Structures are given as C-alpha cells and as structure tokens.
Image (spheres, rainbow, N blue to C red):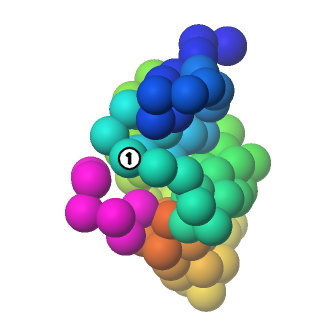
Amino acid sequence: ATRLRLGSEVDMGTPGFAAPEQYGTGQSDARTDLFALGAVTHHMLSGRDPSADPLNFPALRIHNPNVSSSMEMVVSRLRIAGSDLGLH
C-alpha cells in the first residue's frame, strides 16, 4: 500500500480509503474513521476499487442496483461526515 502523509509526524493510509486530511492537508480526528468506514463499506457494496480515483465515490446504486436507497444514504453520510473538513 502507498503511504500517505499524516501531518508532519507519521506516514499512513491507503489511497482511496484514507480521508482527505491523510493526503497531507490536515490532522486526523474521529471524522477520519467515519470517512474510512464509508470508503470500506462503499468498496464492499460496489466492488469498485477506490484507489483508482481516490476521494471520488460514485453513487452505490450505479455499481450495485441491489443496494437499498437507505443503505446508499448511510454510506454517503459516513463519507460526508468524514470529509467535513473543507478539504475536499
């Protein structure tokens, strides 16, 4: 996995699953985990590799029409809550 810059202290993260601040523009906090949970869930339900286009998550139902609209909303809200840092 590619290592991303986390502040000036530690490199960590996987492209596509890492929150925007892990790309070197901010400090991690609880929202980082929310974003990662949304990214992992999106990957599990869509089968789409998020490292192909990090920080871009097409609507789940485009890739998997069997996903309910409620689940799509939950995953979307996780990523939005996680990226609510004005960095993306």
Which amino acid type is shown beneath numbered disc 1? Answer: Gly
Q: Is residue 27 magenta?
A: no
- Residue in front for this viewpoint, 56 or 61: 56
Give how far across and how far down residue 20 sits, in percent.
40, 45
Picture layout, residue 4 above or below residue 31 = above
Q: Which residue does the numbered mark 1 point to in the structure image? A: 26
Q: Farthest top residue?
A: 2
Residue 41: in sight, yes or no?
yes
Give the left or right position of residue 69, taking residue 45 as reference: left
Residue at image location 38% in from the left, 47% down from the top: 26
The majority secondary structure of the magenta stretch comes to loop
Picture layout, residue 14 above or below residue 22 = above
- Residue in front for this viewpoint, 6 or 57: 6
Q: Farthest front residue?
A: 9
Give how far across and how far down residue 11 sits, in percent.
59, 22
Give how far across and how far down residue 50 sits, in percent.
53, 34
Residue 16: in sight, yes or no?
no
Secondary structure of residue under mark 1: loop
Which range of residues does the magenta coloring cover?
A: 83-88
Q: Farthest right residue?
A: 44
Give how far across and how far down residue 52 sits, in percent.
45, 23
Picture layout, residue 18 above or below residue 53 = below
Residue at image location 58% in from the left, 61% down from the top: 29
Give the left or right position of residue 79, taking residue 47 as reference: left
Picture layout, residue 44 above or below residue 35 = above
Residue at image location 41% in from the left, 62% down from the top: 83
